[in-house]
Image: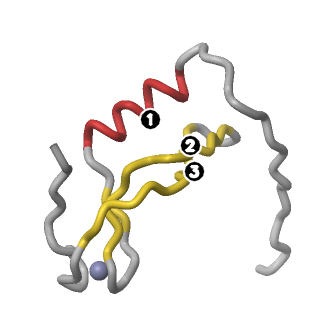
Amino acid sequence: MPRVYHKCHFCGGEVVEKKITVDYRWGEELIALIKNVPTGVCQICGEQYLKAEIVKEMERLVHSRETPKKLIQVPLRELAVA
Ligand SMILES: [Zn+2]
């Protein structure tokens, strides 16, 4: 059954499901990229909507002991403006 999305909360645009890559973060220095996440994307403003069951599955996945497909390096920089 296809997931149904409401119209965009911000602009009233049509929300269509796409498979996107989500950066899932938890804590200060932990981040996981999750590919292939079914996400509702507003056709006008690009706002993204995730279904609760998808968020749960992402949580399960990042905390699981399954070996990740790949480990990548992420640069950390600091902006020096006051
Ligand atoms: Zn929108």
Identify residue type, mark 1.
Met
Instruction: Name the N-terminal-most of marks 3 and 2.
Output: 3
Q: Secondary structure at mark 1?
A: helix
Q: Is residue 45 above or below residue 2?
A: below
Q: Where, by quadrant of the figure, is residue 75 drawn?
A: bottom right
Residue 12: x and y, percent? 18, 83
Query: Residue, x 24% and y 80% (percent of image)?
Result: 10
Instruction: Name the N-terminal-most of marks 3 and 1.
Output: 3
Q: Which mark is residue 23?
A: 3
Badge 3: residue crowd in 10 Å (few <14, some 14–19, many ≥20): few
Badge 1: residue crowd in 10 Å (few <14, some 14–19, many ≥20): some
Residue 14: x and y, percent? 22, 77
For the C terminus, give its image quadrant: bottom right
| Mark 2 lies on residue | 34
Instruction: Name the N-terminal-most of marks 1 and 2.
Output: 2
Identify residue type, mark 2.
Ile
- Most extreme residue toward the top is 65
Q: Secondary structure at mark 3?
A: strand
Badge 2: residue crowd in 10 Å (few <14, some 14–19, many ≥20): some
> Ligand 1: does it lie within 8 Å of the C-beta at label 3?
no
Q: Nearer the viewer, residue 74 or 69?
A: 69
Residue 65: x and y, percent? 60, 13
Q: Nearer the viewer, residue 15 or 50?
A: 15
Determine whether label 1 and label 2 are within 8 Å by CB: yes
| Mark 1 lies on residue | 58
Relative horizontal placement of residue 7, taking residue 42 as reference (left or right): left
Please name which of the two marks, 3 or 2, marks the residue nearer to the observer.
Answer: 2
Q: Nearer the viewer, residue 30 or 23?
A: 23
> From mark 3 to mark 1, how far is it between C-alphas?
10 Å
Identify residue type, mark 3.
Asp
Q: Where, by quadrant of the figure, is residue 32 drawn?
A: top right
